[in-house]
């Protein structure tokens, strides 16, 4: 089959790879109808990780079940399913507690499993014609048959639940004010989720005009950080800061001119929320490469003003989203017409266009807020 294969920094190719098949009785084989490119893929694409060439990318997948193993009971050939990016067993301590992003079975010793991601287990991605889904009873979200809401449902694999997770980590309550750093797909979904949860005012910080326009379109207040300090702009518009804050940028924050360390969005958030506020961090910070010399600051070791964090009595939650914890409810909001996360999708392209789509999404070109691929 054809698949998007990582070749090296800033290069992917669509190539023939081995067909996946049902390997365990608990597996399903899914024919992919939609697979999205994620900001998380860009960490590997840009060469920021130890990903080796040859990885098939793609953790935001949905499609039609082609075949199931003999031990699968709740999923059948022909079912339309969305696949949470987390691969989880459903029976370990973390899964039982709802923390399916941290499954202890599928990738022992690490932080959970995922399709097509370095460090997250030996699972090829779904930017391909077919995908093997382990523990299929647990890892398939059933969708209504047909083709309706394809873009909306595709967002259930990752970014809609991730945006929602950010608001959960930040404990967003009705009436509160929220600052979201990053108007990428994840930040937009976090802002959208905060509004769904009844936030009174949501600020979205970025510098990319069409992304800020999308933020405004959903009812958030766009803040362009190139027009002056974002924390100051937001503090001026609120009573000394927002109640809650969300980091949807992570490590890939822009490196300011003349500086080596990226602008750590966490420091901006600490200055943006009022004292005793809560931060939700879903932007990805990569662990330090264990192979790096000890004197080198690893990617996960950045200068965070812990003193200010303490002084303001802030709280913080972070990590991979536990997609399973939210995706049924969010799916039902889509079906009921109360949520339409597909508004972020700006491009649907054939799988073969992946190299061009990656390059443009990576450059945050106009009209490339979120790209989905049709294999
Ligand atoms: P993206 O790269 O498209 O979006 C990031 C946005 O941040 C861009 O629009 C960029 O212009 C903006 N930005 C850069 N520097 C900034 C700064 N200093 N202040 C404000 N905005 C700034 O990526 P995305 O798909 O939206 O993903 C965002 C992050 O979320 C990535 O780190 C990704 O890995 C992570 N992620 C985490 C999870 C999870 O489960 N926790 C899931 C999906 C994605
Ligand atoms: Zn993703």
Image (cartoon, rainbow, N blue to C red):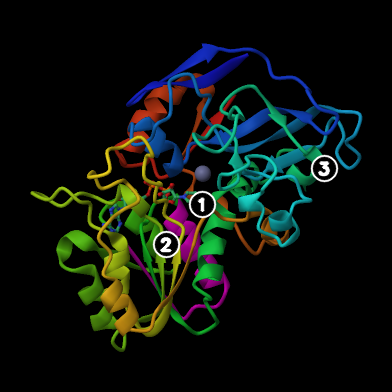
> Can you tell which quarter of the image residue 293 is in?
top left
Q: Are marks 1 and 2 in contact (CB under 8 Å)?
A: yes
Residue 367 horizontal side relative to residue 158, left or right: left
Residue at which label 1 appears: 343
Q: Residue lying furthest front in this view?
A: 294
Q: Nearer the viewer, mark 2 or mark 3?
A: 3
Mark 1 burial class by Cα count in 10 Å: few <14, some 14-19, many 20+: some
In x, y percent, where is residue 136? 78, 38
Q: Earlier in the sequence, mark 1 or mark 3?
A: 3
Q: Earlier in the sequence, mark 2 or mark 3?
A: 3
Tell me what residue is drawn at x 27 percent, y 77 percent.
Answer: 308
Residue 242 horizontal side relative to residue 88, left or right: left
Magenta segment, which residues? 186-205
In x, y percent, where is residue 276? 40, 85
Instruction: Give the alpha-carbon distance from disc 1 to disc 3, as whole Å.
Output: 30 Å
State the count of labels.
3
Q: Nearer the viewer, residue 319 or 249?
A: 319
Residue at which label 3 appears: 137
Mark 2 burial class by Cα count in 10 Å: few <14, some 14-19, many 20+: few
Residue 187 within the magenta-colored segment of the rendering:
yes
Q: Earlier in the sequence, mark 1 or mark 2?
A: 2
Instruction: Give the alpha-carbon distance from disc 2 to disc 3, as whole Å.
Output: 38 Å
Q: Name above or below for residue 301 compared with residue 49.
A: below
Mark 3 CB within 8 Å of ligand 1: no
Q: Quadrant of the N terminus?
A: top right
Q: Secondary structure at mark 3?
A: helix
Residue at which label 2 appears: 217
Q: Are marks 2 and 3 in contact (CB under 8 Å)?
A: no
């Amino acid at each position: 089959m054809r698949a998007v294969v990582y070749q090296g920094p800033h290069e992917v190719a669509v190539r023939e790879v081995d067909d996946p098949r049902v390997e365990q009785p608990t597996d399903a084989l899914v024919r992919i109808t939609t697979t999205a490119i994620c900001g998380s893929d860009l960490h590997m694409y840009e060469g920021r990780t130890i990903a080796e060439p040859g990885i098939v990318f793609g953790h935001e997948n949905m499609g039609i079940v082609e075949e199931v193993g003999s031990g699968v009971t709740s999923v059948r050939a022909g079912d339309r399913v969305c696949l949470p990016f987390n691969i989880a067993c459903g029976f370990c301590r973390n899964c039982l507690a709802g923390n399916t992003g941290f499954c202890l079975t599928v990738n022992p010793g690490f932080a959970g499993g995922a399709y097509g991601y370095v460090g997250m287990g030996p699972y090829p991605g779904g930017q391909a014609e077919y995908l093997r889904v382990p523990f299929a009873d647990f890892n398939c979200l059933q969708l209504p048959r047909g083709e309706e809401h394809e873009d909306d449902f595709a967002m259930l694999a990752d970014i809609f639940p991730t945006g929602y997770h950010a608001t959960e980590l930040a404990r967003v309550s009705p009436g509160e004010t929220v600052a979201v750093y990053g108007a990428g797909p994840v930040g937009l979904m976090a802002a959208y989720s905060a509004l769904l949860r009844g936030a009174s005012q949501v600020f979205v910080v970025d510098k990319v005009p069409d992304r800020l326009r999308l933020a405004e379109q959903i009812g958030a207040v766009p803040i362009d950080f190139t027009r002056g300090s974002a924390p100051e702009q937001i503090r001026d518009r609120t009573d000394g800061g927002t109640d809650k804050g969300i980091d949807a940028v992570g490590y890939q924050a822009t490196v300011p001119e003349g500086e080596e360390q990226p602008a750590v969005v966490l420091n901006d958030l600490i200055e943006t929320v009022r004292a005793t506020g809560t931060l939700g961090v879903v932007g990805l910070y990569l662990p330090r490469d264990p192979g790096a010399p000890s004197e080198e600051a690893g990617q996960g070791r950045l200068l965070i003003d812990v003193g200010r964090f303490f002084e303001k009595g802030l709280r913080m939650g972070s990590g991979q989203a536990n997609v399973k914890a939210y995706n049924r409810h969010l799916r039902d909001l889509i079906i009921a017409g109360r949520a339409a996360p597909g508004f972020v999708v700006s491009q649907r392209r054939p799988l073969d266009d992946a190299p061009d789509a990656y390059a443009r999404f990576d450059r945050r070109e106009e009209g490339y807020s979120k790209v989905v691929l049709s294999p």
